[in-house]
Every structure is written in structure tokens, then in C-alpha cells.
Image (cartoon, rainbow, N blue to C red):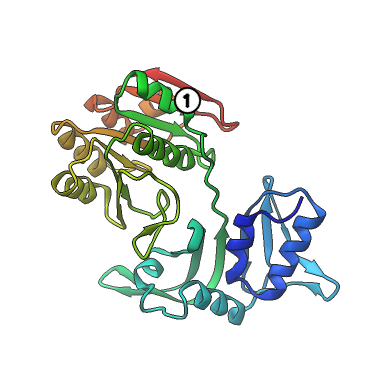
Amino acid sequence: MGMEECVSQAIRVLPERVQTLVAAQCARKAVRIEELRLRTGCPVSLFAGGREWGLSDADGPCVADGAMLRQVVARATEHSLYAAGEQLRNGYCTLPGGHRLGICGSAVMDDGQIRTLTAFSSLNLRVARQLRGCADALFRALWQRPLSMLLIGPPGCGKTTMLRDLIRQLSDRSRFRVGVVDERGELAACLDGVPQFSVGACTDVLTSSSKEAGIYLLLRSMRPDWIALDEISALEDVEALCRASYAGVRFLATAHAQGRADLDKRPVYRALLETGVFSLLAVLSPDRQLTIEGL
């Protein structure tokens, strides 16, 4: 198994020695790399198949230090920390192809808010993959019943990837206008205003806005048929969804939960169900099995 193109693209921000070690791992093992971790004073590690291990060669372990982390962040931000200030405040940088560099370090605070990060201590390079067709079952369900849908499942099961593909299909195949509130920049992964993932020709993306403010902005400015958002987590999100539903727009959203019973146990999700905004519930299991039911 050679190196996937997405991996080759993602690791361009890494030092040459690390790139060489990753290429060697791909050549020796049939691994589907998900993340690369750089922690000061520790070997650079690779995460794949549910396990993490350090990288080494004949010269010994490839240990990360402060200079290495600064070099990676400089490459990721194209040597302009000022231009990437908003992303650093949020603890990540979006890279070409939709890959994401998570950043930890010393937070510089201003009036209780993180203004930027310095003295980087660890980095997490997440390899992005777009799986076209993974939302076929969801698209067929909405083709028969175009109703608001909530997609739930445990962390890491693929909810965001599936939601992204559903947005693309509704936009390109059904020509619906879809507004995306991409609060964390993971659905479309816009870079300089250009989505790094395909989210459809009839899709409008609002990045780095809160869900509450983003929903109202899209309603006022883009007249969407659908609004999509990732990870409902606060009562403010629920209230915004409820108010916006009176405008006739339909919603696609995700939430962290194991199933309907798990939703009922959590105050925010219980309030969400009580609004009646969502009519369909899609449940994605840890092994990526999908079930769809009415609410």
C-alpha cells in the first residue's frame, strides 16, 4: 500500500525527516493514517487503526522540539501568524485539502478570551478524507420525505463526514439551496473563502460564526431551503433552531449521543426533541451502521 494522496498533501507542512518516516510507514504497513502528533520532548507519533506509535529510523526516535513545532506552524500559516490569528485563537489552522492542524501552547488572554497561542507545546495534524456516497442512504430517505434530520452517534464514528456528503448531494443532485454554519471550519474547511471539501454548487458557507448568529444571518441573506450545522451542544443553538423553523427552512444537524434514549437523558438534547424541529433521527453506530427512524 503506497501513500494516499491525501496523506501526501497533509504532511507537506512537516519537516522532511518526518515526511520520510511517514512514507516509510505507508510503504511497510497497510495503515490508514488518521493523525500525526508532535509533542515537545516526545517522539513524533502516528495514529492509525485505533493505536498510536512513535516514529523512528536508524538514527533513533524522531523527537519533536520547540523549533520543529514553530517550523510546522509557520508553514501551516504561510509564515504569517497575524493572518492566521483567528484560527490560532481557536486552536487550529485549516490547510489546503481540508486537513487540520490542531495547536496547543501558552494562551495569551485578553479580557477572559484567548487572543492567540504562543510557545507551542503540541500539534495534531488530522488527515482529511472526503467519502463521496457515504450519505446515499440519508439522501434516499430525504428524497422520499424531505424533513429536518438529526444525525447522532458517538465521537469519531463519521457524523461530520456523512453530513458533508449529504449537503453535497442535496445541493448537486436535488439543487436545493443549502446554507452551512461551519462554526469550527470542519464541514467545508474554507481556506481564503474556498471550500476545501466539495459541498455542492448550490451551497453557501458561513465560517467561524456561532450557530445562533449564523442561522439568522443565513436566513436574512441567502434564503436557504436547508440549513446544516455540526454538533449542537448548547441551549442557544436549540432556541435559534426553534425560532428559525417558523421561517419554513429545514435543518440538518449532528449531535453526540448513542441513541434516542441517550438524547432523552441530556437536558440540551431533551429540549431539542421537545421543540419538534426534527422529524427524522439517523443513528450512526461506532461500527458505522446506520438506522433511520421518525421522531
Quarter of the image where the C terminus is located = top left
- Left or right, residue 34 beside residue 108: right
Residue 89 is situated, as x and y percent measured from the top left of the image, at: 37, 68
- Left or right, residue 128 beside residue 198: right
Residue 120 is situated, as x and y percent measured from the top left of the image, at: 51, 75
User: Going 70% across and 56% down the picture, which residue do you hit?
Assistant: 3
Residue 18 is situated, as x and y percent measured from the top left of the image, at: 69, 70
> Going by the picture, which residue comes out furthest to the right?
58
Residue that mark 1 sits on: 137
Q: Is residue 2 above or below residue 257?
A: below
Residue 43 visible to the viewer: no
In which image quadrant can residue 224 be found? Answer: top left
In which image quadrant can residue 286 be found? Answer: top right
Q: Is residue 251 above or below residue 221?
A: above
Residue 198 is situated, as x and y percent measured from the top left of the image, at: 43, 48
- Residue type indicated by callout 1: Ala
User: Going 51% across and 34% down the picture, which residue do you hit?
Assistant: 133
Residue 87 visible to the viewer: yes
User: Going 68% across and 58% down the picture, which residue do you hit?
Assistant: 46
In which image quadrant can residue 111 be found? Answer: bottom left
Q: Secondary structure at mark 1?
A: helix
Q: Nearer the viewer, residue 203 or 85?
A: 203
User: Going 68% across and 48% down the picture, which residue do you hit?
Assistant: 32
- Left or right, residue 64 beside residue 139: right
- Count up the numbered dots: 1
- Label 1 crowding class (10 Å Cα cut-off): few <14, some 14-19, many 20+? some
